[in-house]
Image (cartoon, helix red, strand yellow):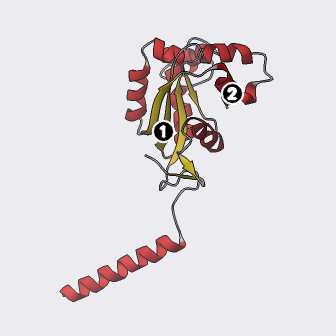
Amino acid sequence: MKSIILQLLARFWCIVFLFSVFFPTRSKSNGSIGKEITLALIKPDGLVGNYSDRIKDIILESGFHILRETALQLDEDTAATFYVEHSSRSFFSSLIKYITSGPMWVMALEKENAVADWRALIGPTDARKAKITHPDSIRAMCGLDLEKNCVHGSDSPQSAQREISFFFKDVFSGGFITKHDEL
């Protein structure tokens, strides 16, 4: 009886191994099984308003894992490089002035559907609209308006990879995570 159970277990693990070789579940976006990563920024108004602890609590309570995090203050050149896709827009100089007005908290967040779930948590870009249509969102909690909206979230997995690599140069290597676009 014992030998039959051992044979069945050996066959089971052999099948599991072969299945994993021929049908890998590793995500191309970040290398973690079934997970995605996204960039989260707590902008200067979020830090000045003492919202960072509450925002981090919401992140963790929502099932995200914070892979990397750091506080930093961008200079104008670095901010302009990060927001280059908005350089031709009328609000660009105001955005750069705002984003360089104080320190930010930068995080790489991981979870299944990280990009969409983080975007849902932060709410609409315009914090005034968020207060009406998404009153439980982070932007409703701490944002002021379209520009001073407290947080940033990547708008796609591709943007997330680009944005995370901007702040954490060693996070991505060949499309896989190697270490623990809008405003």
Q: Is residue 167 left or right of residue 1?
A: right
Residue extending furthest toward the right? 88
Q: What label does residue 109 carry, if any?
A: 1
Residue positioned 47% across, 43% down in the render? 110
Q: Amino acid at mark 1?
A: Leu
Q: Position of residue 147 (x, y in %)?
A: 64, 15
**Contact (CB < 8 A) between labels 2 and 1?**
no
- Say which element carries label 1: strand
Residue 78 position (above or below residue 113): above
Count numbered badges in the picture.
2
Is residue 183 in sight in this rendering?
no
The 10 Å Cα crowd at callout 2, few under 14, some 14 to 19, many 20 or more, is some
Q: Amino acid at mark 2?
A: Tyr
Q: Position of residue 58 (x, y in %)?
A: 41, 28
Q: Position of residue 116 (x, y in %)?
A: 56, 38
The one of 57 and 130 positioned closer to us in this rendering: 57
Residue 155 position (above or below residue 83): below
Q: Whole-Å distance between the Cαs marked 2 and 1?
A: 20 Å
Residue positioned 60% across, 55% down in the render? 174
* Residue carrying label 2: 83
Q: What label does residue 160 carry, if any?
A: none
Residue 14 position (above or below residue 181): below
The 10 Å Cα crowd at callout 1, few under 14, some 14 to 19, many 20 or more, is many
Where on the picture, by quarter, is residue 120?
top right
Residue positioned 45% across, 38% down in the render? 68
